[in-house]
Amino acid sequence: MRAIKKLKNIIQDSPDSAQGLVFARLLIALESGNDFPIKDLYDLNLKDFELAIELMRDWRIDGYYVAKSSGKPT
């Protein structure tokens, strides 16, 4: 399962949990291009931290392919 689906499940299952809130803010920051405080990632347990890193890796790769297919420079 891709990281985005895992995060969305966590957010839906526990939207008021510490990790749910961090993941929701991270997704919003990625979608909007706004800043995200990296300290919030370090406050997560290791498993959730690695999931956040996986999300950002997937997001970057997806953005690369979208830009490449539309002819935009990466």
Image (cartoon, rainbow, N blue to C red):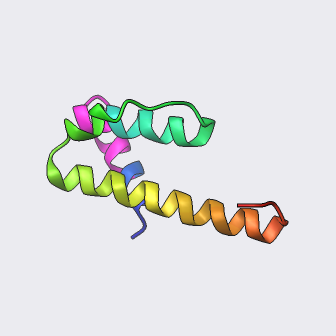
Q: Say which quadrant the N terminus sits in.
A: bottom left
Which quadrant would residue 69 be assigned to in this image?
Answer: bottom right
Using the image as rendered, state which of residue 2 and residue 36 is in the foreground: 36
Image side of residue 47 versus residue 8, left or right? left
**Vertically, is 9 above or below 68?**
above
Q: Residue at x 62, y 35 (%)?
A: 32
Which one is in front, 20 or 13? 20
Residue at image coords 74%, 62%: 67
Extreme residue in the left direction: 45
Residue 3 appears anywhere in the view: yes
State left or right for residue 5 relative to residue 18: right
Is residue 26 part of the magenta span, yes or no?
no
In the image, residue 1 sits, relative to residue 54, either above or below, namely: below
**What span is in magenta?**
9-20
Whether residue 4 is visible: no
Question: Residue 17 falls in which quadrant of the image?
Answer: top left
Picture coordinates of residue 41, whole percent (x, y): 28, 40
- Give the percent coordinates (x, y) of residue 40: 29, 33
Q: Nearer the viewer, residue 19 or 63?
A: 63
Q: Residue at x 34, y 36 (%)?
A: 38
> Going by the picture, which residue comes out furthest to the right?
71
Q: For the C terminus, which image quadrant? A: bottom right
Q: Is residue 1 left or right of residue 50?
A: right
The x, y position of residue 30, in whole percent, is 54, 42
Q: Residue at x 30, y 56 (%)?
A: 51
Q: Position of residue 36 (x, y in %)?
A: 44, 32
- Of the pair 13 and 68, the residue shown nearer to us: 68
- Secondary structure, magenta segment, majority class: helix
